[in-house]
Amino acid sequence: MTKDTVTITDNRTNQTYTFPVVKGTIRAMDLRQIKTSPDDFGLMTYDPAFMNTASCQSSISFIDGELGILRYRGYPIETLAEHCTFLEVAYLLLFGELPTGAELKNWVHEITHHTMLHETTKQFMESFRYDAHPMGMLVSTVAALSTVYPEARDIDDPKNRLLQMKRLIGKMPSIAAMSYRHSLGFPYVYPDNDLSYTENFMNMLWKMVEPKYVADPVLARALDILFILHADHEQNCSANTMRSVGSAHTDPYLTTAASAAALAGPLHGGANEEVLKMLDAIGSKANVPAYLKKIKEGHGKLMGFGHRVYKNYDPRAKIIKWAAEQVFNVTGRNAKLDIALELERIALEDDYFVKRKLYPNVDFYSGIIYQAMGFKPEMFTVLFAIPRTAGWLAQWQEMLADSEQKIARPRQIYVGQNVREFLPIAQRASLVATEH
Ligand code: ACO
């Protein structure tokens, strides 16, 4: 028997089965051979929330949760954050290699020339309520782009796919900026092609009456680094949504909108907004121990703490802490930083958090930087969605090119009623406890 196998004995039948182990994994479909009779469906695995199931093979990002490592296409996140621009990293994620100087120039030109929104999209956005949440506006508007570019449905044509991907990466900051200005009642600022990706985003957010917007270079670079850190993160909830919805061959706008909807949840990208609310609720350093006591007693979660994969330290949180210092040199220190640092200090010494391996994640400090830069908490998840679009699209492309992938369709264990006799309405007694 070869070494790279696993042997399972089914005690129900005393039969033994041997399956290959490839890359630390057995094929779930192999288990179907394990049956108690020829009519038996075969063994399945039960894995709510995909705690121990690989849904794909991927060469985009690599995480070692125990060691606190994150790499995109083999490059450590720290190196990319130090030496690259966000668009360079987006290129790396999508095409698998870092661009040459000429390739990057062309890529930046292409993205820059896809930043404009159709005027009807602008009107669509203007029709949201004045206090609409920017993330709801972003999700709906990205979905609405599907109506502007109906040719996007042709997902089999690589050239067509690439065009839609450029549009999505180019237009995401424009949609995000418009959702922000909508909430303030300010007129929409059109993109400026002379500016870099993040400078142009800042221009669309904050330009008032000056003829030319000039971004603070430290803040523009900090935003670029934050975008790099948020660009991809293997099979997280929204990437899994991208693959799952995309597996139905839905067009990339609707698929990206679905992923952005997943990101909006407070347990995923919505956590940075929740962190700020939490820091506001704590109010001062002195209140930190009492707040942590409540969390340990089961009243809520410490937002921005914990991660499904990282059980040591989220490497992105380390870089964000460094970027925060650069931003605060320009904007002044955000008072909430002291509360956050105190929370981190006490939590990392506390048995409850140590035992459960709960460390600050990417969202713990990002909101504090964003607030210092002038963003309202409602914008934080939108800021996450802009760079993550590159990662979603890389995951989408990889899924489409993978000959093993089909429409995503998990199995279930049915625990409902067996077949029942139907009663006409007049003979039914109410059996439902909840009030309607
Ligand atoms: N505060 C307090 N306790 C926590 C926290 C937290 N932030 N996170 C996990 N725990 C506890 C759980 O209650 C559980 O305790 P138990 O074993 O006594 O029941 C234990 O730690 C394990 O936690 P799970 O919920 O099983 O871990 P899971 O991997 O399912 O969840 C998640 C990961 C969703 C990130 C979770 O840690 C959480 O809700 N954190 C707060 C929200 C957050 O910051 N999300 C952003 C994640 S990063 C991102 O998406 C970009």
Image (cartoon, rainbow, N blue to C red):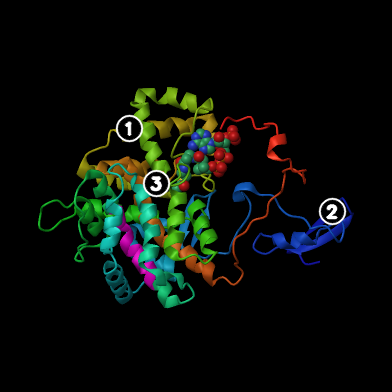
- What residue would you read off at disc 2? 10
Looking at mark 1, is its residue's CB closer than 8 Å to ligand 1?
A: no
Q: Gap between marks 3 and 2, in whole Å?
A: 47 Å
**Membership of 126 in magenta stretch:** no
Disc 1 versus disc 2: nearer the observer: 2
Q: Amino acid at mark 3?
A: Lys
Q: Is label 3 in contact with label 2 (beta carbons under 8 Å)?
A: no
Horizontal and vertical percent position of residue 155: 47, 72
Pick whichever of labels 1 and 3 is earlier in the sequence. Answer: 3
Pick whichever of labels 1 and 2 is earlier in the sequence. Answer: 2
Q: Which image quadrant: the C terminus?
A: top right
Question: Element type at marker 3?
Answer: helix
Prevailing secondary structure of the magenta residues: helix
Magenta segment range? 163-177
Q: Amino acid at mark 1?
A: Asp
Horizontal and vertical percent position of residue 332: 22, 39
Q: Which image quadrant: the N terminus?
A: bottom right
Horizontal and vertical percent position of residue 96: 45, 70
- What residue would you read off at disc 1? 338
| Residue at the (36%, 36%) spot, across then down | 276
| Residue at the (49%, 33%) spot, across then down | 301
Disc 3 versus disc 2: nearer the observer: 2
Q: Is label 1 in contact with label 2 (beta carbons under 8 Å)?
A: no
Of the numbered discs in the image, which one, if any, rests on residue 318?
Answer: 3
